Amino acid sequence: MENKAQTEHYRLMRVRLEQARSRSHPNGDVTHGYDFVAPLNEDGHISLEGWKAERALCFAHRLEHGQIVERGVLTHRAGGAGGATWVFDYDPKRVGDEEAGYRFGAHPFVVGEYVSIRDEDGDMLTYRVSSVTPA
């Protein structure tokens, strides 16, 4: 009997994050956030296997006032909490411009859920998943 590894099912999805309510933005801010493509499994979690196969398609945009202000890629880095970190990397040649998702590997990207991102200044900000659509 042949032993075959099970392949995880995933689909490339475009995820939109909008800044959630905070002290500085009591109503949130739909014009500030992120737009990125990631392989999501059936539960809405980022698929590492999918990312390895599709990484060239996994872009990330940072949005301010509804406009793209930075273009980069979704990258998986070894180390960090839980053994790995997902980051938005805007310049692979420059260290320190990455924005790390807090426990992105554990959070489902489902409309209405909240995630946090540590920006390049070290500030942790919260975002609401506003849409998840096929890429």
Image (cartoon, grey):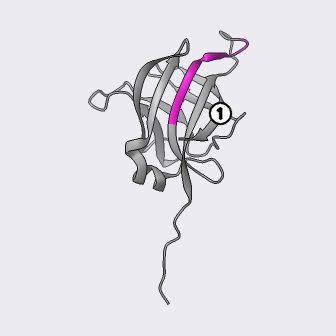
Residue 36 screen position, x and y as percent: 51, 34
Question: In which image quadrant can residue 24 be found?
Answer: top right
Q: Look at 52% across and 51% down and name the residue there.
A: 47
Residue 25 screen position, x and y as percent: 67, 11
Q: Residue furthest top?
A: 24
According to the image, label 1 marks what residue? 131
Q: Which residues are magenta?
A: 26-36
Direction from residue 127 to residue 38 in the image, left or right? left
Residue 83 screen position, x and y as percent: 48, 48
Q: Look at 63% across and 42% down and name the residue there.
A: 107
Direction from residue 86 to residue 17 in the image, left or right? right
Residue 94 to residue 53: above or below: above
Residue 13 to residue 23: above or below: below
Towards the viewer: 10 or 88: 10
Q: Amino acid at mark 1?
A: Ser
For mark 1, does the 10 Å Cα neighbourhood hold few (<14), some (14 to 19), or many (20 or more) residues? some
Direction from residue 107 to residue 68 in the image, left or right? left
Magenta residues, dominant SS class: strand
Q: Is residue 110 visible?
A: yes
Residue 30 screen position, x and y as percent: 64, 18
Q: Is residue 30 magenta?
A: yes
